[in-house]
Amino acid sequence: MKFLITTLATLAIISSPLSASPYPGFSEKTEIFSDKTDGSDRIMFHPSAETDPADKILQEVEKNNTTLSALRKEAQARKLGNRTDIYPSNPEVEFGYLWGSPSSMGTRQDFGVSQTLDFPLAYGYRKKIADLRDNQVDLEYQKSLRDIRYETSMVIYDLIYTNALRIEIEKQYSNAKAIAHAFKKRFEAGDVSKLELNKAEINLYHVTKVLEHLNIDKEYLMNQLAGLNGGTRIELESSTFGTQLIPVSFENWYAEAEKESPVLGWLRQNIEISQKEIALTKALALPQITTGYMSEKVVGEKFQGVSFGITVPLWENKNKIKQAKAAAEAAESIAADEKVRFYTSLKALHSKTISLQNSVNDFQNKILTFNNVEMLRKALDLGELSIIDYFHEVEFYYESIEHLLDLEREFNKTAAQLRLQIM
């Protein structure tokens, strides 16, 4: 934002030189972290509330988010639905009352109870498929949870960025107000022209509007965060990004991310379900058995005994096994494709995060190294530079400050996207 060029330069006219302490919003240098335990070479993130201000808020959002609450209830209902068709069909009871003609023949009473059963293997496969679908429901919830965490993290980092920028603009506002007041006195004394006074007053007006805009942005972000937290407002005044710990070895970290990914986990479960459905289809292609009890009662006579029947599967299940095998092959192809895309996207994201990390660290060092504001300030005070020349000299420096703040926000967002893969 170009307003930083003018307002920060104006600030430098009356303020003391910038110190070597980190600027608002800038964390200490980001770090590369390697955690090796028990002789392993396992590289992982280990975030904590001390390293990232987003962590505690994410815990609150997970408890209060209304979308997640609804999804938990939906998951429970779906798990119950997964077990509605795993049991045998209902028994059938028949009763018949027949009267004879002529009436002297009396009546006839028939009674029967029968139960149709699939081949026993089918019930075992249905139970296993239900268990796998339950796991898929849990994985779908985990994916939604990560989506909510990611959305919340993006709002949090935008808020931190806005808070850091507001601190700078508030300083500029205070100093712009003092400059405008000083220039007014100098104008009344005849030391400065009306044009210079107008520049000071326009600068004050500009900074005031920028600050108002930032306050609007912050309120909007706070409302977004409250919406994610189930309507409960969370006050976030932090203006410093936490330390992000980046995995050194992508391949070792990816092995953990692949295992933890709810998307890939869901696809693995889907492959296993498709294999079980092939076995279930084969079991259903075996004969069904019907057993039961029957009785017949007529005048002076009664017959009773057991009944037995068998259903011969000739046409009903035709092509079902082929269809199940084709579905299994499709599930494997989809999983393989998704795994390739998952790997390449995370590889690109990891590379981007490392590059951003290096850029942030380099900027933090170089901005302090090339800080000529103090020398320019002295030259301005001695009359060796005009105000316009001073503005041109410091323009690149203050653009770099703004860029660093924006760069660190982007780094934290990409690092969070990586970190959430194994949370």
Image (cartoon, helix red, strand yellow):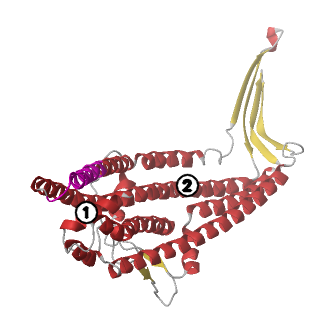
Q: Secondary structure at mark 2?
A: helix
Magenta-drawn segment: 191-212
Along the line of sight, which residue is nearer the eye, 260 or 82?
A: 260
Whether residues under marks 1 and 2 lie with C-beta atoms below 8 angstroms apart, the answer is no
Is tag 1's residue or tag 2's residue first in the polypeptide sequence? 1
- How packed is label 2: few (under 14 Cα within 10 Å), some, or many (20 or more)? some
Mark whose residue sits in front, 1 or 2: 1
Coordinates of residue 175 in the picture (x, y in percent): 19, 60
Q: Is residue 35 left or right of residue 388?
A: right
Q: Is residue 294 left or right of residue 349?
A: right
Viewer-proximal residue among 347 and 328: 347
The residue where tag 1 is placed is 10
Numbered label attached to residue 366: none
Query: Residue reaching furthest bottom?
Result: 39
Where residue 364 appears, as percent x and y from the top left, is 37, 77
The answer for how far apart the CA atoms under marks 1 and 2 are is 54 Å
Q: Secondary structure at mark 1?
A: helix
Q: In the image, what residue occupies the spot 27% across and 65% down?
A: 387
Q: Please give the residue where the numbered disc 2 appears in the rendered image.
A: 140
User: Residue 208, can we see it?
Assistant: yes
At x 25%, y 52%, the residue is: 195
Image-based side of 277 in relation to 371, left or right: right
Tell me if residue 233 can be seen.
no
Give the image location of residue 328, x and y in percent: 76, 58
Badge 1 amino acid: Thr
Q: Is residue 201 magenta?
A: yes
Q: At label 2, which amino acid type do we have?
A: Glu
Q: Nearer the viewer, residue 359 or 189?
A: 189
Residue 322 position, x and y percent, is 85, 53
Which quadrant of the view contains residue 107?
Answer: top right
